[in-house]
Structures are given as C-alpha cells and as structure tokens.
Amino acid sequence: MKLAGLMRSSTLDYPGALSAVFFFSGCNYDCFYCHNRSILTGPGTDMEISEALAFLEKRKGLLDAVVLSGGEAALQIGLTELALTIKAMGFMVKLDTNGSLPEVVRAMLEKGALDYVALDYKAPWRRYREIAGENADPEAVKETATLLFDAALPFEMRTTVIPQLGLDDMLEMAREMPVLPRYVLNPYRMPETYREEDLFRLKKPPHTPDAIRAFAEEVRPFQPNVIAY
C-alpha cells in the first residue's frame, strides 16, 4: 500500500478537527467532474506508508485526526489495519468513501477503526449511473448508509451540486434518505484534469453560492441538518 498524496494539515476535511489527509489512487467510479482524476490510475507521489506514519509520529499533539481519502480509499487492501495503527497513535480516523464497498465499511466499523465517515451522495438513485459511471451501484450506497445509521457513528452525506443537478433532483435526494445527522452541499468547480469528451458537461455554468444556499433552504424541511458551502 502506498499513498498517492499527503495533505499535511487541513481544517476543512474533518469537522472540528485539524487533520492530515491520506490520498489513495484508484477508484471504481467514473464521475466526469472528479477533482482527483490525476490519481485515479497513476501512483501520484508514490509515498510509502511507513513514511506517512513517520510524519504522523512527529505530529502527535499537533494534529487531531487523519482522513483516508482518494480516489476510493476502501479499495485498499489492509485499510482497516492501517486505520487501527493510526488510532493507536492517538489520532481520530475519518473515511471518505463513495459507499460502493459496504463490506469494507462494515469490517472497519466492527473493529472500531473509524471515528467519522463522509459518504458521497452523488445524485438521485435513478440517476446514479448517469452521474457516477456505469459501475456506480446505488444499492451499495444505500447499504453503506444503513450500516452507518445502525452503528450510531458520527457521519455525513455530501453532494457536489454539479450543474446537472437542479432543485427537483435535490428535493428528490432529500426525500430518498432518512434524516441525516449532517448533509453537506458542496459547490462545483471545474477540475484541472479532465477528459476532452467530458468538456461539454464540465463547462456548463455552475450554480452560484446563493443558488446552492437556496437549494439548502428548499430541502431543509426533509433534511434539517443540511449545510451549504
């Protein structure tokens, strides 16, 4: 296991905590608007885990948490053991996931390897493959969400409000899920790395911050814990 990238300090990736972010390459989804496309197939920095753990050793007492992100971190063999190693060092562990591998999330929950999870909620279930690629399975995401509800673990679901999602979609998504402990609406920004065939979709004008805040108010009756950035 190697890292595709390391963010040494972030105030944004773990709610209320100062964290480092471990990025892993590889993903089983194919979202046309992906901001980490450069690490989906390549090794990125190709950092050894031992080097990343040595970095954490020096940050004890300075950092609160580590975020396991990607790509799709859940694809990594040995992720549970890595998370437990990080927790044993005194850090909280957050997993960023697309929810496609509920069996991995289940194993991590059963072993107490997680403190927080951010689960992507790409689109209404009926549009999941349209937005996230043919491999996207909404049933797996639903199963992952159910595991998180049942575990009573702090978690959030989050949606990047791409131009292809409108108010009707946002309302549909809000109704499709039980009340979430935290539902985050993130703005869309055009990625730096993309496929030329996706350009016509990527260049569609984004929703303004005011529009996203308006979406949040519309969905609030169904998801009272919605937050718009």
Image (cartoon, rainbow, N blue to C red):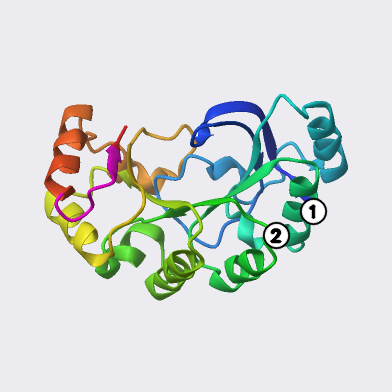
- Disc on res. 76: 2
Q: In this view, does 57 lie to the left or right of 198?
A: right
**Residue 131 appears in which quarter of the rendering?**
bottom left
**Number of dots carrying numbers:** 2
Identified by mark 1, the residue type is Met
Front residue of this view, candidates 43 and 77: 77
Residue at figure coordinates x 28%, y 64% from the top left? 177
Q: Position of residue 192 (x, y in %)?
A: 47, 32
Q: Are marks 2 and 1 in contact (CB under 8 Å)?
A: yes
Q: Position of residue 181 (x, y in %)?
A: 36, 52
Q: Nearer the viewer, residue 201 or 103?
A: 103
Q: Can residue 71 be seen in this view?
A: yes
Question: Does the magenta segment cover residue 100?
Answer: no
Query: For the point 50% across and 32% down, which residue is it?
Result: 16
Mark yes or no: residue 21 visible.
no
Mainly helix, strand or loop, the magenta region? loop
Quarter in which the C terminus is drawn: top left
* Position of residue 221 in the picture relative to residue 21 (left or right): left
Residue extent of the magenta highlight = 221-227
Q: Earlier in the sequence, mark 2 or mark 1?
A: 1
**Please, is residue 50 above or below residue 180 in the view?**
above
Q: Name the residue under label 1.
A: 1
Would you place residue 80 above or below residue 106 in this image?
above
Q: Which amino acid does label 2 sit on?
A: Gln
